[in-house]
């Protein structure tokens, strides 16, 4: 029976236990999600996930080889053994939970709802009847958007739904072809930073009642405040939800391996932070929050040792 683990901190253990057998690991990535992963001017894959993995590889004497893989085939590839890991800001969704097991995530990515400034939308409910991009079809962004609509007693039928990626959404928003669009990404994210250089916009907050609904019905959500000034022209705090980014790897790892990787990453935060500013947001406390399914035994062992789980 096919099973795969979605492991927030699996990578260091894989490398630490594989060093004698292999000098290089193959890592799949879909570099369309800055700042987690993107292509630079030389078409090289860069970003937080890349920096984190390279830093850990350096510590254990391995080399990571990144492969640019289309998102719609990335999970099938790891299932078939085409590569060792997926490091592409993988979020937890109900559909993925049916096929995968998860351990602790390593990073919060917030759900951001960008609205044209000066329009009548004072709240999320006012999006009814407007043209809204909810992310690529089948993406984590689309899953998140559907659940937020559900919290407000709405569905995609209440809007003129568009299924566009972040860059296309921002471009059409600039041209006035969209009233709003959803982004699930670490803040600040490039598409909104760039948007702020040319357009006025507002970021919608999620109401208290709807926030509680999401946390009660989908345990992987946590509340997140996007502070004023995160983006130019953002003059007020925005309260939204965050989900956890994860790495994905094969399930043929022992409790000791997962224990060692969990310990390895959370006891080397300073080294990770030195390679990328987003490393500052890693913490054992956030690693145990917003997780709606059981931890792997190795991860559970580590978090109990340091007093983060009872």
Image (cartoon, helix red, strand yellow):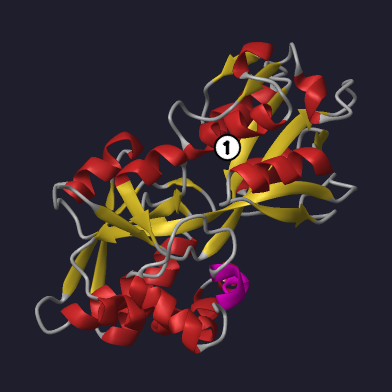
Residue 177 in the figure: left or right of residue 288: right
- Residue receiving disc 1: 144
Residue 302 versus residue 40 in the image, above or below = below
What x and y, as percent, mark residue 128? 75, 16
Quadrant of the snapshot with the C terminus: bottom right
Image point (54%, 80%), residue name: 274
- Name the image quarter holding residue 85: bottom left
Residue 40 versus residue 269: which sits nearer the camera? 269
Q: Is residue 66 left or right of residue 94?
A: left
Above or below for 97 versus 182? below
**Which secondary structure is most common in the magenta stretch?**
helix
Callout 1: SS: helix
The percent coordinates of residue 146 (x first, y second) are 59, 29
Which residue: 26% across, 54% down? 4
**Is residue 182 a member of the stretch shown in magenta?**
no
Residue 67 at x, y percent in the picture: 26, 52
Which residues, given as a range, are shown in magenta? 280-287
Camera-nearest residue between 85 and 165:
85
Residue sitting at 73 percent across and 20 percent down? 179
Between 135 and 57, which is closer to the camera in this rendering? 135
Left or right: where 198 falls relative to 286: right
């Amino acid at each position: 029976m096919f099973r795969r683990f979605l492991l927030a901190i699996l990578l260091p253990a894989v490398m630490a236990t594989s060093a004698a057998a292999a000098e290089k690991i193959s890592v799949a990535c879909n570099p369309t999600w800055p700042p987690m992963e993107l292509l630079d001017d030389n078409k090289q894959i860069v970003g937080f996930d890349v920096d984190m993995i390279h830093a850990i590889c350096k510590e254990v004497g391995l080399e990571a080889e990144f492969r640019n893989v289309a998102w719609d085939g990335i999970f099938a590839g790891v299932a078939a053994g085409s590569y060792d890991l997926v490091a592409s800001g993988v979020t937890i969704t109900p559909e993925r939970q049916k096929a995968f097991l998860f351990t602790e995530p390593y990073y919060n990515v917030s759900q951001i709802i960008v609205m044209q400034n000066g329009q009548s939308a004072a709240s999320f409910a006012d999006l009814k009847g407007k043209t809204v991009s909810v992310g690529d079809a089948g993406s984590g962004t689309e899953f998140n958007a559907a659940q937020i609509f559900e919290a407000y007693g709405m569905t995609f039928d209440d809007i003129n739904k568009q299924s566009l990626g972040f860059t296309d959404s921002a471009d059409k928003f600039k041209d006035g072809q969209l009233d709003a669009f959803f982004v699930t990404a670490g803040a600040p994210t490039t598409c909104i930073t760039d948007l702020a250089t040319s357009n006025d916009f507002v970021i919608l907050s999620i109401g208290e009642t709807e926030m509680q609904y999401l946390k009660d019905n989908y345990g992987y959500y946590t509340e997140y405040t996007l502070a004023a000034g995160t983006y130019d022209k953002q003059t007020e705090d925005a309260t939204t939800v965050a989900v956890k980014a994860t790495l994905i790897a094969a399930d043929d790892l022992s409790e000791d391996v997962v224990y060692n990787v969990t310990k390895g990453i959370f006891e080397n935060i300073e080294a990770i932070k030195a390679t990328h500013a987003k490393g500052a947001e890693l913490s054992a406390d956030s690693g145990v929050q917003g997780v709606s399914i059981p931890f792997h035994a190795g991860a559970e062992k580590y978090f109990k040792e340091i007093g983060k789980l009872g």
